[in-house]
Image (tube, helix red, strand yellow):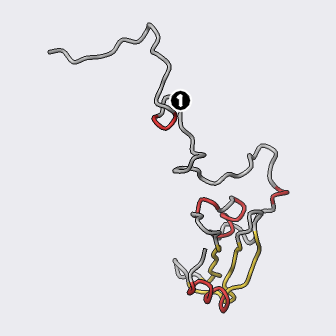
Amino acid sequence: MTTFGTRLHTMFKGRLVGKDADGRSYYESRKQNRLGGGELRHERWVIYKKGEDPSAVPPEWWVWLHHGADAAVPVSKRHPWQAPYHANATGTAKAYHPQGSDYDGGKRARATGDYESWSPEE
């Protein structure tokens, strides 16, 4: 989701570099700018889908956005041990809730016989 100003900035100053599998668009400024530490480099940004937050950016594009690589790492170059990317689900219905969590019914297994509750001495 973009604002009118972001759309104008993208139209006049950006060039499309690529899109990820979920349809997010990645842009780079046409001219180099003096960023952060005074070095010249292209500004990079992403146009998110409505309702997304930055955790939705897959790792292969994250490294490109943060100037860690000159191009996004293709999914075909991923190692077999790398799990597929999933966006952060915190605060959603798909969030992880451990057994006994209030969000998971609040019922835990009873304590075993080796557990003794502590109470302060009076």
Residue at 71% x, 68% y is 69
- Vertical placement of residue 83 versus 53, above or below: above
Front one among 28 and 52: 52
- Vertical placement of residue 83 versus 21, above or below: above
Q: Quadrant of residue 62?
A: bottom right
Residue 80 place in picture, x, y as percent: 82, 45
Front one among 50 and 63: 50
Residue 113 place in picture, x, y as percent: 44, 7
- Vertical placement of residue 77 versus 80, above or below: below
Per the image, the residue denoted by label 1 is: 99
Residue at 66% x, 66% y is 68
Q: How many marks?
A: 1
Q: Quadrant of residue 19?
A: bottom right
Amino acid at dot 1: Gln
Front one among 51 and 80: 51
- Vertical placement of residue 33 versus 2, above or below: below
> With 46 as the anchor, is 116 left or right in this view?
left
Residue 60 place in picture, x, y as percent: 72, 61
Q: Residues within 10 Å of mark 1 (few under 14, many from 20)?
A: few
In the displayed orientation, state which residue is furthest to the left: 122
Residue at 57% x, 45% y is 95
Element under label 1? loop
Residue 47 place in picture, x, y as percent: 65, 74
In the displayed orientation, state which residue is furthest to the top: 113
The quadrant the N terminus occupies is bottom right
The quadrant the C terminus occupies is top left
Front one among 102 and 74: 102
Residue at 52% x, 34% y is 104
